[in-house]
Image (spheres, rainbow, N blue to C red):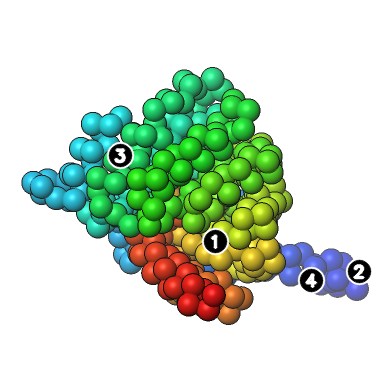
Amino acid sequence: MYFSPLLMVLLLLLTLVGLSTTFRFSPSSARRAGGTIGTRLGVLEEPSQRPKVGGPMPDSRPKWFKVPAPQREKEGSKFNEISDGLKNLTLATVCEEAQCPNVGECWSGGTATIMLLGDTCTRGCMFCSVKTSQAPPPPDPFEPFKTAEAVTSWGVDYIVMTSVDRDDLDDGGAGHFATTVKVMKEKKPDLLVECLVSDFRGDLGSVESLAKSGLDVYAHNVETVERLQNFVRDPRAGYRQSLATLDHAKKVAGVYTKTSIMLGLGETDEEVVQTMKDLRAIDVDVLTLGQYLRPTERHLSIVEYVHPDKFQRFKEIGEELGFKYVASGPMVRSSYKAGEFFMENMIKQERKVDSSTI
């Protein structure tokens, strides 16, 4: 049978297209082959990946990914002491409201992150399980005093305070935070205070008032890489807006600054490293990186479980870039007792050195 040269070329092209289609890896086929490509090869399969509500999830958690169970049943344990103390004073913690997987480990070790300004947020970020409303109840004016009472009764040397976003308040709640810090410092001057706060809608006046309140660490989370901001965070948040608040806090008060990134949302390695560079460009001191976990089916699906080896590599890169401290691992969160222990010792050591040179 005779085939014209043109027909032969067309047949060859069709064959090549068929082969390329046959051997192209899709996320689902990669999972069937034994885990995501990101887990096995150290890179994400598609640079344009992004998380979606109801999107495909990895078939199961890897064997190396384990969540510690809290030890609630031990009579007289530190866990129960903190839990009971918070309930008696009607204080909320992000540990419980955001369903943090480290609540058992941290509370048992005497570390808790108190959540000021109530338990209802005015924003609706797609990774967070905290309640939302555009008109939450007004802040408790006695909360700063109750918080100081609780913290000083625990006998801790380092405390983290965070809050929901309160866009309904003129200053975003910065004044409430500042009052709480001042009352704490009056009760216990040597207490180290970290405030993990919102972006205050980009209001640098609010940032400045809190940064100058006497706190020791000003923390605000960028949450994810720049490309994924609109898919992960509320539209009122933003990558550049977050960087601006961290930059301003450092410039006006010289405080330690800290931020956090969630991995497993579809980011590429290059995007994570670029985020680190952007943070170091504004002299951010401390970075934490952890695995994103979907709190409910109404939230963003996990794109991949990032292997501990990759977390370790990001830690090494962060240290090379000049962060004072990098906590990086699947179970690491913004407020994590191991990181706070390091922060406490680092701050005390650096201040000791500074005072000896005066």
Direction from residue 10 to residue 37 in the image, left or right:
left
How much space separates mark 2 and mark 3, taking CA atoms?
Answer: 86 Å
Q: SS at mark 3?
A: helix
N-terminal-most mark, 4 or 1? 4
Q: Position of residue 244 (x, y in %)?
A: 70, 51
Q: Is residue 23 above or below residue 109?
A: below
Task: Give the residue at mark 1.
Answer: 256
Residue at numbered disc 2: 6
Q: Amino acid at mark 3?
A: Glu
For the question of whether residue 231 can be seen, the reply is no
How many dots with numbers?
4
Name the amino acid type tagged 1: Tyr
Instruction: Find out whether the residues at labels 3 and 1 contact each other: C-beta distance under 8 Å.
Output: no
Residue at point 39%, 53% (across, down): 189
Q: Which residue is mark 4?
A: 12
**At x 61% / y 55%, what residue is drawn?**
253
Residue 42: x and y in percent read 53, 73
Q: CA distance from mark 4 to mark 2?
A: 10 Å
- Give, as a three-letter code, the residue at label 2: Leu
Indicate the position of residue 84 as horizontal and vertical percent values: 20, 37
Q: Is residue 42 left or right of residue 89?
A: right
Give residue 210's quadrant in the image: top right
Cβ–Cβ under 8 Å for marks 3 and 4? no
